[in-house]
Image (tube, rainbow, N blue to C red):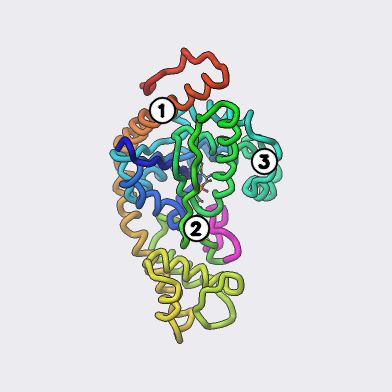
Amino acid sequence: MENKKIILSGIQPTGIATLGSYLGALKNWAALSDEYDCYYTVVDMHAITARQVPADLRRTQYEQVAILIACGIDPGKNTLFIQSHVPAHAQLAWVLNCYTMFGELSRMTQFKDKSAKNDENINAGLFTYPTLQAADILLYQADLVPVGADQKQHVELTRNIAVRFNGIYGDVFKLPEPYIPEVGGKIMDLQTPTRKMSKSEIADGGCILMLDKPEDILRSFKRAVTDSETCIRFDPDNKPGISNLIQIYSVCTGKEYTDIENEFSGKGYGDFKPVVGEAVIELLRPIREETRKILADKAYLENVFKEGAEKASYTANKTLRKVYKKIGFIDSFLPAKAQR
Ligand code: TYM
């Protein structure tokens, strides 16, 4: 236990997680959870950079934690917690804001995309979102950060902030590496396969949510946008739709792209699409059923939140104490151990 490498990752509780989040990140979270000392957090503080309906935000946090447990993340072996329950995240984020450059944050593609989409609410939290993410990671001295490809830039910024801070104060932070799956790192929308699958675009059937009903999943796959050819070939530049389906089928089944191309050689898109849909349905079925069971036991989930926050606070406060000391704060009021 002592020598295990450390993992930290996070997910926003804004609605049910998508198939993209599962294949790009959560599947790895579960796979790595025996081998590493893992901290997995539901990032409610990041979620409020966009306006949320309070009751929905409260409910989806329960759902998100239940989904994580149903994916195979054992809260007894790993630290599963809600970000706002560990105040050190907000405390370190403020410090890191003072070691992060305006220009660096301005270059973040996620900030540029999100502010372009929602120009009436470009708030300061959206701008400094990556420094809070850096705090999430650096508080736990994480070695690895399992994420989808879209989060690579944020992990790189985290490293840059850590290098800058260490350069001034000595070795305070470990430098984390992103861990992005080779296949599944960027799952595309089924209706607009040039765009990442995302919860914000669920209306047209292009996005699959982890708790969707099998018949809805199958319908979305049958309607998936492809191209005017008939050949099932992996070629993301020229055939983004079919390549996305091949990618999804590959992660679901563990088959190589060339094996999939051979398996479906001479067959049409109409044969392939429902097969991919069925593979996704079978992959998600046990998670959906288990999530329902876990959600029925609210007291159990609340106990998971409480124990997770205690374990996380212990580690996080150790790093925060060190940071406060290095920068010249008087730290005697900080709890040395878990707060509760
Ligand atoms: P979020 O909530 O948008 O997504 C959660 C995880 O799912 C991955 N992901 C995808 N992977 C492949 N294809 C897709 N279409 C797809 N959509 C989402 C994301 O890359 C992510 O790994 N900022 C983060 C949350 C966060 C975090 C952290 C992550 C906060 N603090 C610290 C790592 C470490 C986010 O918004 O993820």
Q: Nearer the viewer, mark 3 or mark 1?
A: 3
Q: State whether residue 121 appears in this view.
A: no
- Percent across and percent down for residue 164 are 60, 34
Location of residue 134 by image quarter: top right
- Most foreground residue, 336 or 15: 336
Mark seen at residue 104: 3
For mark 1, does the 10 Å Cα neighbourhood hold few (<14), some (14 to 19), or many (20 or more) residues? many
Where does label 1 land, which residue?
313
Q: Nearer the viewer, mark 3 or mark 2?
A: 3
Q: Residue drawn 62% across and 48% down?
A: 110
Q: Are marks 3 and 2 in contact (CB under 8 Å)?
A: no
Q: CA separation, marks 3 and 1?
A: 29 Å
Magenta-colored segment: predominant secondary structure: loop
Location of residue 52 by image quarter: top right
Tell me the magenta residue range.
192-206
Q: State whether residue 28 appears in this view.
A: yes
- Percent across and percent down for residue 128 are 62, 36
The verdict on label 2 being within 8 Å of ligand 1 is: yes
- Most foreground residue, 8 or 160: 160
- Asked whether, in this view, residue 111 is left or right of residue 216, the answer is right
Where does label 2 land, which residue?
185
The kind of residue tagged 3 is Glu
Secondary structure under the numbered disc 1 in the rendered image: helix
Mark seen at residue 134: none
For mark 3, does the 10 Å Cα neighbourhood hold few (<14), some (14 to 19), or many (20 or more) residues? few
- Asked whether, in this view, residue 69 is left or right of residue 177, the answer is left
The kind of residue tagged 2 is Gly
Mark 3 / mark 2, whichever is N-terminal: 3
